[in-house]
């Protein structure tokens, strides 16, 4: 496969999946999106976390204090356990990712309306610039559809929420699919719509028809891949949600693991376990069944065949 090599030589964005939705078998164009298999990235924007950023307000006071008193030690340490992606947002889209996990925040030291993304620390990228980047990519790929999950909203006031929604409308305009029944690709193409935007703030969603409610995310919060798979299988037995939902195959460090492995990072913890997680991914089936999966989101997109594996699951719908 050809591909664009990112800043880290171990990660590749394979353009072969850049238009995978339009390349699906036409029989799948009339399947609702929540019955398709869709690859996603967990904590999409952590590839551009700012080394000079203060510790986010949502973190413990002790960690924020250490970040101020010992920034040369604390911030690099936090950074290596906060970074979940290496590829940029355009590279992820080129690789085939269609669900983007966007954790929005207002940095206290920032200007009044400059919104950043956050995962323990803030990003160099601004929200408005990133949304424009996504919009430009969509204009070049008119039959691809993205699901944007705006979450967390650390430090956002009511006014900042309204400012963010105004930015969303100004940037995407008619590309936005208003909430309702989960559409099919054919329905979206007919309407010229390419964006489903979920917003995890119910009061804001109630005021704006173009926003969808927060999408459920199955987060295992596990260090060991075996325990993560056990959690995901338990969730499947409980039955899938009615609409769009995410199964996260992302591992999560805890304090004990960090103390035992002080020289490691989230990347070093995750990469050796990807082959084990890949086996589970390849066993999944999309569709309307209670144990079917929908969006599957992972860390370190481009490190293996994850995106292609998730897309290929749609072939199983043709055998039903």
Image (cartoon, rainbow, N blue to C red):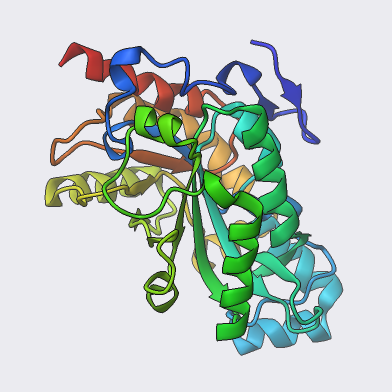
- Quadrant location of the N terminus in the rendered image: top right
Q: Measuring 44% from the left and 61% from the top, which residue is drawn there?
A: 211
Residue 169, compared with residue 97, is above or below; it is below
Q: Position of residue 210 (x, y in %)?
A: 44, 59
- Quadrant location of the C terminus in the rendered image: top left
**Residue 63 visible to an observer of this rendering:** yes
Q: Position of residue 121 (x, y in %)?
A: 69, 69
Residue 44, compared with residue 316, is above or below; it is below
Q: Quadrant of residue 90?
A: top right
Q: Quadrant of residue 96?
A: top right
Q: Measuring 55% from the left and 84% from the top, which residue is drawn there?
A: 158
Q: Is residue 95 left or right of residue 24?
A: right
Residue 120 vs residue 33, the one in the foreground:
33
Q: Position of residue 300 (x, y in %)?
A: 60, 40
Residue 41, compared with residue 45, is above or below; it is above
Q: Is residue 92 left or right of residue 180?
A: right
Residue 111, compared with residue 49, is above or below; it is below
């Amino acid at each position: 496969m050809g591909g664009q090599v990112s800043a880290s030589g171990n990660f590749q964005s394979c353009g072969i999946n850049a238009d995978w939705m339009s390349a699906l078998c036409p029989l799948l164009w009339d399947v609702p999106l929540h019955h398709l298999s869709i690859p996603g990235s967990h904590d999409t924007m952590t590839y551009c976390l700012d080394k000079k950023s203060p510790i986010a307000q949502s973190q413990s006071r002790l960690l924020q204090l250490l970040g101020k008193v010992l920034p040369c030690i604390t911030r690099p340490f936090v950074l290596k356990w906060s970074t979940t992606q290496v590829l940029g947002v355009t590279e992820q889209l080129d690789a085939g990712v269609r669900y983007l996990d966007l954790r929005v925040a207002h940095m206290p030291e920032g200007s009044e309306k400059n919104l950043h993304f956050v995962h323990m620390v803030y990003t160099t990228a601004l929200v408005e610039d990133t949304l424009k980047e996504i919009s430009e990519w969509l204009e070049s790929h008119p039959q691809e559809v993205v699901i944007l999950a705006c979450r967390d909203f650390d430090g956002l006031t009511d006014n900042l929420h309204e400012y963010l929604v105004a930015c969303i409308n100004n940037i995407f305009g008619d590309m936005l699919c208003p909430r309702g029944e989960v559409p099919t690709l054919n329905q979206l193409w007919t309407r010229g719509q390419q964006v489903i935007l979920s917003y995890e703030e119910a009061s804001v969603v109630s005021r704006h028809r173009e926003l969808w409610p927060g999408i459920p995310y199955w987060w295992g919060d596990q260090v060991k891949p075996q325990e993560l798979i056990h959690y995901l299988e338990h969730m499947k037995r409980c039955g899938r949600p009615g609409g769009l939902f995410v199964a996260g195959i992302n591992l999560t460090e805890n304090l004990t693991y960090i103390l035992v492995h002080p020289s490691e990072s989230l990347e070093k913890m995750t990469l050796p376990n990807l082959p084990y997680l890949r086996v589970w991914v390849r066993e999944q089936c999309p569709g309307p069944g209670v144990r079917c999966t929908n969006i599957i989101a992972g860390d370190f997109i481009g490190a293996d065949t994850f995106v292609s594996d998730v897309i290929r699951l749609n072939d199983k719908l043709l055998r039903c």
